[in-house]
Image: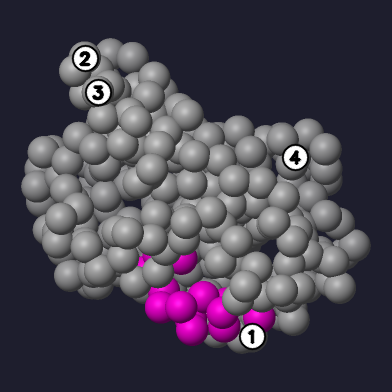
Amino acid sequence: MSIKLEGVMETLLITLYARAKDAASATPLLNDKKAVEMVKKIDYDFAKFDSGWMSYYGVLARAKMMDEEAKKFIRNNPDCVIISVGCGLDTRFSRIDNNKIQWYNLDFPEVIEQRKLFFKENPRVKNIAKSALDPTWPNDVKTNGKKLLLISEGVLMYFKEDEVKDFLNIITNGFESFEAQFDLLYKMLVNNGSRHDTLKKMNAQFNWGVKDGSEVIKLCPKMKQTGLINFTKEMKHLLPGTKKLIVPFLYITNNRLGIYTYQK
């Protein structure tokens, strides 16, 4: 089937293909068989991403570490609610589900329509076909007093700073309390998408980044930062051979996971 996604929405195909390549490898890290299934059915030139080895290992490291942090939250709150902000064609729910959590996928209507082609309905999974910048989307989430986790992977770097601020205001105005786990771009990569090994092949740009994650708090002082994890911690184990030589550089420039809490 053909898939028509433009601009930022098209970038979800980068992460999808990386997970599919991993599953087809001899030593898979995520072993995302669903990603393989989707890539086989989508009529798209995925081969243009094959040269992007940095993105490949980066996507896998990020996904694994974000899975681990989400699992920690679930272990402490087994009957929780989780929102995947900018879910794309992600399969994280199936990778971390404990058969109790309530899950919400939030993304543009065009993306949610694509998800419906590949994922079966599940009473514990609901789709919200809205932009993360639509101030009404929190109204579609029912927490019923349960602990709430917001996960954002590969999203905030495409927002402009004022849009990041708007998003943070939407979630703090929309919920009584939550933990948020945000994938954050290093600030020196902003406006340098043309140098990125896969992003340069599509019409999208990095618009916002951070140094240490405190930038989130400056935009929304109501939140508190509780952690910052560099994805190089996992990526250094994945890089083969001489590619490990770039690890010191990666600790400076790689994405990191910012962890935040909010209590009204």
* 36 on left or right of 127: left
Mark nearer the N terminus (3 vs 4): 4
Residue at numbered disc 3 = 245
Tell me if residue 15 can be seen: yes
- Highlighted range, magenta: 156-169
Residue 97 falls in which quadrant of the image?
top right
In the picture shown, does residue 63 fall above or below 152? Answer: above
Q: Amino acid at mark 2?
A: Gly
Is disc 3 surrounded by few (<14), some (14 to 19) or many (20+) residues within 10 Å? few
Give the structural element (helix, strand or loop) at label 1. loop
- The residue labelled by disc 2 is 241
> Residue at image x 56%, y 57%?
213
Does 194 appear above or below 65? Answer: below
- Between marks 3 and 4, how big is the CA–CA gap? 36 Å
Mark 1 to mark 2: distance in Å?
49 Å
Q: Earlier in the sequence, mark 1 or mark 2?
A: 1
Task: Say which residue appears at 48% left-offset and 46% top-offset.
Answer: 256
The chief SS type of the magenta part is helix
Q: Earlier in the sequence, mark 3 or mark 1?
A: 1
Q: Which residue is mark 4?
A: 74
> Which label number is shown at residue 136?
1
Would residue 159 be counted in the magenta stretch? yes
Question: Residue 51 location, x and y as percent?
Answer: 11, 38
Which of 237/45 is in front? 237
Camera-side residue of 116 and 23:
23
3 vs 1, front mark: 3
Residue mark closest to the camera, 1 vs 2: 2
Taking the magenta stretch, the answer to whether it contains residue 85 is no
Marks 2 and 4, the one that precedes in the sequence? 4
**Quadrant location, the C terminus:** bottom right
Could you tell me residue 116's position as x and y percent? Answer: 44, 60
**Real-space Cα distance between discs 3 and 1?**
47 Å
